Amino acid sequence: MSKASPSIVVLTGAGISKESGLDTFRDKDGIWSRVSLEDVATPEAFHRNPARVQAFYNDRRRQLVESDVKPNAAHEALVRLEQAWPGEVLVVTQNIDDLHDRAGQRNLIHMHGELLKARCEACGEAHSWKDDITVETACPSCGAVGRLRPHVVWFGEMPFEMERIYAALGTCGLFISIGTSGSVYPAAGFVQEAGFYGDAHTVELNLEPSDGSVQFHEHLHGAASEIVPAYVE
Ligand code: BJW
C-alpha cells in the first residue's frame, strides 16, 4: 500500500439501496416493522417453519427480479471510485440484493449472502436462483428435495469471507461506512477494527448518526444518492 493511494474498504448496508426502492430493516417503515426477525431470519425459524421463511425470501427475490429496482447514484459512484483510484477499493456489503453487482462493482464481498442464490443443505452447493423456492424444490446438483435454502446469513450464522475482510480492514488507509445502522455484528465492529486496531481514517455516510457514530473520525449525513457521489468525487 502506498501512502499516496492507500487502500479503501467500503462497508454498505440497506440505506444505500433505499433510494432504489428496497426497504431498510430498522427504519420506521422497515422490514422488521412488518415481520419479526425471529420468524424469518434465524436457522431455528427455518427449521420450525420453512414455508414461512421461503415465502419471505420469495417475495423479496421477486421484487428484485421483476420490479424496476436498479442501482442508484450511490452504487454508481462507488464503481467510478474503484475504476479511478490507483489503490485497491474493496466493497463489503451486508446487502443481499445485487445492485452493486449490476452497477459493475468488481472487488465485492457479499458478507450476508446473496438473494439470487440458493444453497443446498444436503450437498452444500450454491446455485444462481431467480425463481421461488418451495419445500418441494429439488437441488439441481444432488437431487435432494426440500433441502434448498436462501444463500443468506441469518442471526447466529457466520458471515462469509471474514478472514479476507479482517485482513483488508487491518491494512486499509480509509474506511467508509454507508447506509448502515451499525447494530449488527460483526459488521458493526469494522470501524473499530480499521480505525483503532488498524490506522485508517474512518468516515460515516448515513442519513442520520448510526449506533456507532461516535467511533468515526468524520461524518456526512444525508441521502446516499447525494452524499456518496459528493464524498468520493
Ligand atoms: C439511509 C437511507 C438513505 C436509510 N441514504 N442512509 C444474541 C443472539 C444471537 C446473536 C447475537 C446476539 N448478540 C449478538 C449477536 C450477534 C448477531 C448480532 O449482531 N445481533 C445484534 C442484533 C445484537 N450477529 C450475528 O448473529 C451474525 N453472525 C455472527 O455474529 O457470527 C459469529 C461471528 C463472531 C465473530 C466474528 C464473525 C462472526 C450474523 C448477522 C446476520 C444478519 N442477517 C440479516 C438478515 C439476513 C439477510 C437478509 O434477509 O437481508 O442481515 S439481519 C439484517 O441486518 C440484514 C442486514 O444486512 C443487517 C444490517 O442492517 P443494515 O444494513 O444496517 O440496515 P438497517 O435497517 O439497520 O439500517 C439502515 C441505515 O440506513 C439506517 O441507519 C438509516 O438511517 C440509513 N438510511 N435511508 C443513506 N437514503
Image (cartoon, rainbow, N blue to C red):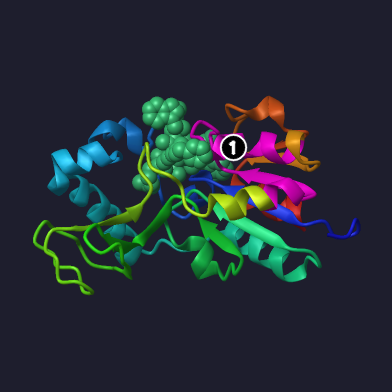
Q: In this view, does 158 lie above or below 150?
A: above
What quarter of the picture does the N terminus occupy?
Answer: bottom right
The residue drawn where x is 11% and y is 63% is: 145
- Residue that extends furthest to the left in the rendered view of this protein: 136
- Looking at the image, residue 104 sits to the left or right of residue 123; the answer is right
- Label 1 within 8 A of ligand 1 by Cβ: yes
Residue sitting at x 51%, y 31%: 183
Q: Report the side of 29 relative to 178 (left or right).
A: left
Above or below — where is 25 with respect to 80? Answer: above
Quadrant housing residue 107: bottom right
Taking depth in this image into account, of 168 and 86 the one nearest to the observer is 168
User: Which residue reaches farthest bottom?
Assistant: 141
Q: Quadrant of residue 73?
A: bottom right
Q: Position of residue 163 (x, y in %)?
A: 58, 51
Q: What stretch is highlighted in magenta?
A: 168-195
Query: How many residues crowd around disc 1 within 10 Å: few (fewer than 14), some, or many (20 or more)?
Result: some
* Residue annotated with mark 1: 207
The reply, left or right, for residue 20 in relation to residue 157 is: right
Q: Which of 3 and 14 is in front in this view?
A: 3
Q: Is residue 68 left or right of residue 82?
A: left
Residue 75, how many percent across, how many down? 58, 59
Q: Which residue is drawn at 29% across and 68% down?
A: 129
Q: Which type of secondary structure does the marked residue at label 1 adopt? A: loop
Residue 20 in view in this figure: yes
